[in-house]
Image (spheres, rainbow, N blue to C red):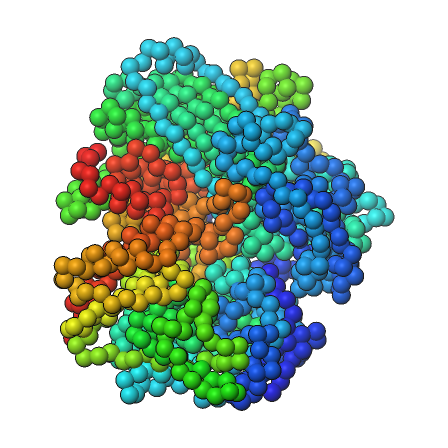
Amino acid sequence: MVAESETTAEPNGWVGRSIPRVEDAALLEGRGRFIDDLGVRPDLLHAAILRSPHPHAEIESIDCSAARAADGVFAVVTGADVKALTASLVVGVKAPIECWPIAIERARYVGEPVAVVVASDRYRAEDALELIEVTYRPLPAVVDPLVATGAGAPILHPAVKSNVIGERTFRYGDPDSAFASTPHRIRVDVHYPRNSCTPIETYGVIAEYDPGDNSYDVLANFQGPFSLHPVMARALKVPGNRFRLRTPPDSGGSFGVKQAIFSYVVLISVAARIAGRPVKWIEDRLEHLAASVSATNRVTTLEAAVDTDGRIRALAFDQLEDCGAYLRAPEPATLYRMHGNMTGAYDIRHVKIRNRIVLTNKTPTGLNRGFGGPQAYYPLERLMQRIAIELNLDPLDVIRRNLVPANAMPYRTASGATLDSGDFPASLAAAIDAGKLGELIARRETARAAGKLYGVGFASVVEPSVSNMGYITAALTPEERRRAGPKNGAQATATISLDPLGAVSVQVASTPQGQGHRTVLAQVVADALGLRPQDIRVIADVDTAKDGWSIASGNYSSRFAPAVAGATQIAAMNLRERLARVAATQLNVAPADIVFAGGRVAARANLDNALPFARLAASAHWAPGTIDSDLGQTIRETVFWTPPELTAPNEADEINSSLCHGFIFDFCGVEVDRLSGAVRVDRYVTMHDCGRVLHPAMVAGQITGGFAQALGAALFEEYAYAPDGAFLSGTFADYLVPTSMEVPEPVILQRESPSPLTPLGTKGVGEGNCMSTPVCIANAIADAMSLTSLDLPATPTKLAALIHGRQNEPRVKS
Amino acid sequence: MKPAAFDYVRAESLDEALDVLAAEGADATILAGGQTLVPMLNMRMARPRVVLDIMRLPGLDRIDIAEGAIRVGATVRQRALERQADLGKHQPLLAAALPWIGHAQTRNRGTVCGSVANADPSAELPLVLVALRGEIELRSRRGARRAAANAFFTGIMSTERKDDELIEAVSFPTAHAGAGYAFREIGRRHGDFAIVACAAVVDTHKARLAIGGVADRPILRELPLPGSADLTDALDAFAADLDARDDLHATAAYRRALVRRLGLQTLQEAAACRA
Amino acid sequence: MPRLMAASSHRVSFTLNGRVVSGEAEPRMLLSDFIRHVLGATGTHVGCEHGVCGACTVQIDGAPARSCLALAVQVEGADIRTVEGLAPAADRLSPLQNAFRDNYGLQCGFCTPGILMSLDALLDERPNVSEAEIREFLSGHLCRCTGYASIVKSALAAARQRREDRVYA
């Protein structure tokens, strides 16, 4: 690998090759620059947060006098203090509810901040937390979303008079006629659980306030979307230019989770203002598990109108989305992220959807890898299996009969998304062949003959990437949208700079958390400019006061490869084009005859007629007068790219919710241990078409990592609550992240159908297995045990009860 | 997640340690490997006034195998016992159970006696000690005594150790000729605390099975030999008698079912291993 | 018999990556905090502070252990190794570190220092380590990015390289 990086580019370039990551040396030597590793001001103070032990309680009084008098304590901040200095965080539905970063008069979930102590060190801050006397008046709590919708349920936000704070219905095509005219109605009922990708680095915020110009300066391991920058600035009651947000160079994983740090950015900023000193807060693991953020849990009824051959004519979704105690931005985005592709990989023209959002006494929800995908695909792909069983068909035939055909691409879905490219049936066939499905089926028969519980499951999904900001407004009625003004797009930005020695720097607002963005961008720019990746220096952390960024910046919806790398490619090509014109003058050839290769800029016809790239690149610094004035400068190029396809929802509520759609077909074999009910994933095959691949090893890393998280979601992980609202998953001994002993290595297969809509032909790939794998494993378990319904996580105790409860029953053939 | 303040005493002799315990009583907590205590300090679930570090006490780091017992001193780390030459020959049950304790990284610090002292109902070492009818050696300023394992554990993380006593050593009886031993455990993930752990000892005349993870302490019962017609009923009765509870990871019914099924397998394996 | 009083700080000295270091710590200060914030060796990371995730793993007298489950005062006089001590030179990676880079054994790199300290000890102890042994040893660490497969590959590659280095040494 090292030897490879020393060589010059092969004819086909750096992109598409697995080169060593530029990020790795520092990380491997302990020289990473994560937020808690960075130098701080000498007057820095440390915050600790007192949290509600009650799921629902009125806060009758808070006595901070003893805490304020304690050794080393500089300030104690309560909800009243925060309310006096800030405004409520913006709420994404039209309902009279507020959302604060700390409990105001009432606590609504276990772990909700109640007070903040600012002290000379974290130990003393935690000591002082114990001196705060809070008088709570406990209220009845509700954690089950169905119960929360019922009459008589405890109401979280009395001003709304209901826990259901949003409801919309959608109809595409003519679903009622389709249901009336189709012979079979097949239905699944699903309770999708709560979980989270729990990055190993927790949240961190360092905030300071300058009373001289009423500005906040914050460093946080925030991941974006930067649509939350205005949310934070408005909450802090300052213009955006007085809320400077920076991110550290390294971030220890996020998977969406570090989006929700924004409410703590507001809280710690206020604490710094009250303390009059910079304040640092590093979330601990118990805080993270109880109160950072969770994916939504969702109750879904999905019904299909099906022909006897398994062809689906219509779908009817009834989704009840549980967003926890507050609707925190960008929710209800989880419910709408998939809105354009609710029909998955299938050609289904008639769809109706009822979406309700309910609040319960649980941690507020937000971004988590897969974001809306697992909740939507679990019912859809369980349904595909049920159709096969109920109609006595081969499950693969049911999938094949419904897949969007290759000749329909680009395919506009019933609800308005455009599936941009791909040959789904061919990918499926290739996976069955290369993934050796036949062997797996034979393995199942052998295992069953030996008395084992062995099953095979399938899942086929489209993986959306590059979210359209406008999809969130599908939560509003067309009338409400008209009043609010259009929202749409997915603007990405990249800046390329040349310095006086001719070296190339790239700056993007992509806030990576381990995905290797800096390496890939070096490859992209190296190819454009005829250089080597090690010649390019990439900065991917963000400073909102100085960098080019947009409201859509950040790292989410798998937008790096399609959008950020694409914008970078455009910036590099723009700069190249202008440099070519400068070179053409100097080399006395036409600009079109200039080639960039091997660190040189040469005339195509005579490669000896050449300039070193660095000399050409530096010329705008040293001798700007030699550059043709109509060329402008060639020092810095900033590109803002937004795909025109991402328009706002139309009057019919059709929404192209994502720009790109990769295809995934997974199958797996699992064995359920008869004794313990434990599930062992015997073999897992995952076929991906994510468009053009920029760095194969990183794509494999994303798939393998996403698969492991999804296996956790399928079998181990749950943010569990007791019926009375007590939180049960408060440590890493209770919230079970799978280890190297539980996660097998998946077999990864790939095809490449470039996206016609992105500059590099790329699509996102980071989230797909979080969407496909939970249901694929569930389908295999259902096949092994002949289960009609199954909710996750598929724990041994749950499965053993089914096995032992049915031990005397004859085995039902599936 | 930072500990509350405490004084720290690093005892340099057994007498010093016993003096501290005599003087401080319940206000002092003994720190050995720290793999159970320190998380509890970090969560402020343990709030001692004094932490007494015994790991520098001389002479307590010995593993002595003699006179039918493996005597393990107070400062012997789990990893050291795991690596003891021929441990499996001297006591296969102990050798089989040790790798199930946490992870290698925690066994590097955690001590054998510390695990016994903490008495987690899911922990492996108390279970093995009970199954083998081992002994705990306690010492205080008042003198030394030996306690039988079966009576030592009194409930969830509670033992009959007095506040002024230090566990000086624990003794695991060595394997008997003609006896077979087996250990099985089911947890959620590798390295997790047991949902059910089974330790079985079978010789020509009798069988006994100890169960961890179900009741509030490890429970030992004499059972019919594997192969006897009445074993199933006896196991069912054993499972029913254990005070199994529901928790996040397993229901009581699940635990009872595992006691019957895993217990039977463990007894059968022990019988098959008989020399 | 030293009795270190709760309210005051006390000098703690030990060897860190071959050099004698010292700093002030209250009795309750965790070794992880002492290494990071008193000594400034921030390569060791903190992920859970209750001994499950393994991010803070360092070698204490040669044995990998959680630095969040040790008090700084406990390791007085000990020999501590952290990730900063692995590379043979500032611009040269050890075979284990190199294997991680070559096999994409890390993504965000936050859990990696702890994993390296565990695997470094494992490979010292078992030069012919198997995949099963690696997986078992690695189970004391949580990684959320990689799905572990590339870490296992890295460890196997490092073991191979170390064996070859020994042959030619």
**Vertical side of C144 occupied by A303: above or below:** above
Quarter of the picture containing the N terminus of chain B is bottom right
Which residue is found at the position 70% from the left and 51% from the top? A134
Residue A707, image x, y percentages: 39, 45
Quarter of the picture containing the C terminus of chain B is bottom left
The number of numbered badges drawn on the structure is: 0
Which residue is found at the position 36% from the left and 77% from the top? B148
Which residue is found at the position 73% from the left and 47% from the top? A61
Residue A192, image x, y percentages: 43, 36
Closer to the camera in the image, A172 or B19: B19
Lateral position of residue A592 relative to residue C105, left or right: right
Lateral position of residue A22 relative to residue A386, left or right: right
On the question of residue A472 being in view, the answer is: no
Closer to the camera in the image, A795 or B117: B117
Residue A85, image x, y percentages: 78, 42
Which residue is found at the position 22% from the left and 79% from the top? B176
On the question of residue A187 being in view, the answer is: yes
**Vertical side of A127 occupied by A86: above or below:** above
